[in-house]
């Protein structure tokens, strides 16, 4: 699997293993975890659950109190301290973080998550669509002797340093790469903007040493090209902060090339920022509601469009079962206004909104706070957006590059053009 220096799905963005803490810290830290947990959750305030926790009252059907929680944690910790076989491998920080993570996950909501400090930093990079690095895609070599550079972003620090796709990275600064997992190698390559990293590579039997100055790299979330018949093709991989500008520039470029129709590909797009997708839809929709969001108290907020940039050319939006969240807001709005045809298969069905809350110590909580509705008032949660033109992807072993879903979307646009 190829590994970028960024990415919602990429392995290198998972937090590295925490350092093992002193045993003396563990004894006090776990014992006081209940009080720390109370401080972490009270920022949401107001609910009977939290009032009971804060006052020491019961907050479970069995009448459990804060002191009960504290006493039970002390008991568990004492048993671990006395009997646990692998005592030297205990990570105190991981135990404490596990309490917070478990508290959030016990809600049973797959979208509510606690993020520790390193996970929060990675999440912010993913959401913003920017990271500090050299701008290269890496993968482990098949024989484990090094790491292969499979892509170098044009104009990036890696490009400026002279790195090329196909280079074998065998040393980063003073660190030997052979036998080291890819996640660790990527952590060596990444670093603060403006700092230098020395990269040692093998190319065509020659060993080369290059120095790159790390910089802020913008993730390319939009790719586009003009297809046959002046049909624009625009693929959006996720909705990050940087995506709107990339989308707007792509539309302008395709318009400048004489575009007569457009296919927007949202397949495998997991979603992203609500404001970003709303801004992008303002470049397409007529005047009216883009999406409405309703919270637990029934309060509703509408995001609207003034219709000044309404897209009037033939349009198709490609989706699949992995198109989720913001992708469904996008396709649902296009479908409700009838400005384009949805092509593919029914989408994932994530119709809820999460809020990221800073917990004040570099960690954060992602909490489900509302449900969203399409312009016509549809909830797609657990249902998804059904395509106007249904077509399953079929792999062609004789032509692996063939894409029957895309071909059908292009046909839909051609039919509209006449």
Image (cartoon, helix red, strand yellow):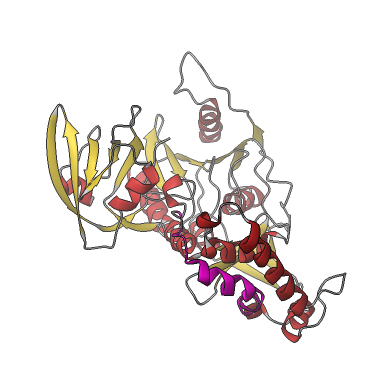
Q: Position of residue 254 (x, y in %)?
A: 37, 44
Q: Taking 244 as reference, is 177 left or right?
A: left
Q: Taking 188 as reference, is 28 left or right?
A: right
Q: Taking 278 as reference, is 143 left or right?
A: left
Relative depth, front residue between 143 and 238: 143
Q: Position of residue 247 (x, y in %)?
A: 42, 52
Q: Position of residue 179 (x, y in %)?
A: 33, 37
The outermost residue toward the front is 82
Q: Taking 189 as reference, is 378 left or right?
A: right
Is 369 colored magenta in this rendering? no
* Residue 416 makes an appearance in the image: yes
Relative depth, front residue between 404 and 388: 404
Residue 61 lies, with reference to residue 273, above or below; the image says: below
Magenta stretch bounds: 17-41
The outermost residue toward the bottom is 55
The quadrant of the rendering that contains the N terminus is: top left
Relative depth, front residue between 264 and 39: 39
Q: Main secondary structure of the magenta part?
A: helix
Q: Quadrant of residue 377?
A: bottom right
Residue 246 lies, with reference to residue 404, above or below; the image says: below
Tally of numbered tags: 0
Q: Position of residue 135 (x, y in %)?
A: 28, 49
* Residue 289 makes an appearance in the image: no
Image point (19%, 46%), residue name:
199
The outermost residue toward the right is 62
Is 37 colored magenta in this rendering? yes
Image point (47%, 39%), residue name:
261
């Amino acid at each position: 699997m190829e590994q970028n220096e960024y990415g919602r799905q990429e392995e290198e963005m998972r937090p590295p293993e925490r350092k093992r803490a002193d045993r003396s810290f563990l004894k006090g830290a776990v014992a006081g975890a209940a009080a720390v947990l109370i401080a972490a959750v009270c920022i949401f305030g107001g609910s009977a659950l939290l009032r009971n926790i804060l006052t020491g009252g019961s907050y479970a059907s069995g009448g459990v109190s804060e002191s009960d929680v504290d006493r039970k944690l002390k008991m568990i910790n004492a048993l671990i301290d006395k009997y646990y076989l692998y005592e030297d491998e205990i990570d105190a920080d991981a135990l404490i973080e596990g309490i917070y993570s478990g508290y959030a996950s016990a809600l049973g909501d797959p979208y509510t998550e606690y993020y520790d400090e390193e996970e929060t930093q990675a999440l912010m990079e993913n959401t913003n669509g920017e990271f500090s690095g050299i701008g290269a895609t890496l993968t482990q070599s098949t024989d484990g002797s090094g790491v292969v550079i499979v892509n170098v972003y044009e104009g990036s620090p890696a490009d400026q340093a002279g790195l090329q796709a196909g280079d074998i990275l065998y040393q980063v600064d003073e660190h030997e790469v052979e036998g080291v997992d890819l996640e660790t190698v990527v952590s060596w390559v990444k670093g603060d903007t403006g700092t230098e990293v020395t990269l040692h590579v093998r190319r065509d039997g020659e060993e080369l040493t290059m120095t790159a100055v790390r910089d802020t790299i913008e993730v390319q979330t939009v790719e586009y090209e003009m297809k046959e018949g002046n049909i624009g093709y625009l693929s959006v991989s996720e909705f990050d902060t940087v995506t709107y500008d990339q989308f707007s520039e792509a539309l302008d470029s395709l318009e400048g090339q004489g575009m007569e129709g457009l296919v927007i590909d949202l397949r495998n797009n997991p979603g992203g920022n609500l404001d970003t997708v709303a801004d992008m839809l303002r470049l397409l929709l007529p005047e009216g509601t883009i999406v409405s969001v309703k919270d637990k108290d029934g309060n509703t907020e509408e995001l609207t469009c003034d219709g000044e940039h309404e897209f009037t050319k033939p349009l198709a939006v490609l989706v699949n079962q992995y198109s989720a969240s913001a992708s469904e807001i996008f396709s649902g709005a296009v479908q409700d206004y009838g400005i384009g045809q949805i092509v593919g298969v029914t989408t994932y069905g994530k119709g809820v909104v999460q809020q990221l809350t800073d917990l004040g110590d570099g960690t954060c909580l992602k909490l489900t706070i509302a449900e969203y509705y399409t312009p016509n008032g549809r909830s797609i949660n657990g249902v998804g957006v059904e395509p106007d033109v249904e077509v399953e992807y079929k792999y062609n072993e004789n032509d692996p590059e063939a894409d029957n879903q895309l071909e059908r979307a292009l046909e839909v646009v051609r039919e509209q053009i006449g």
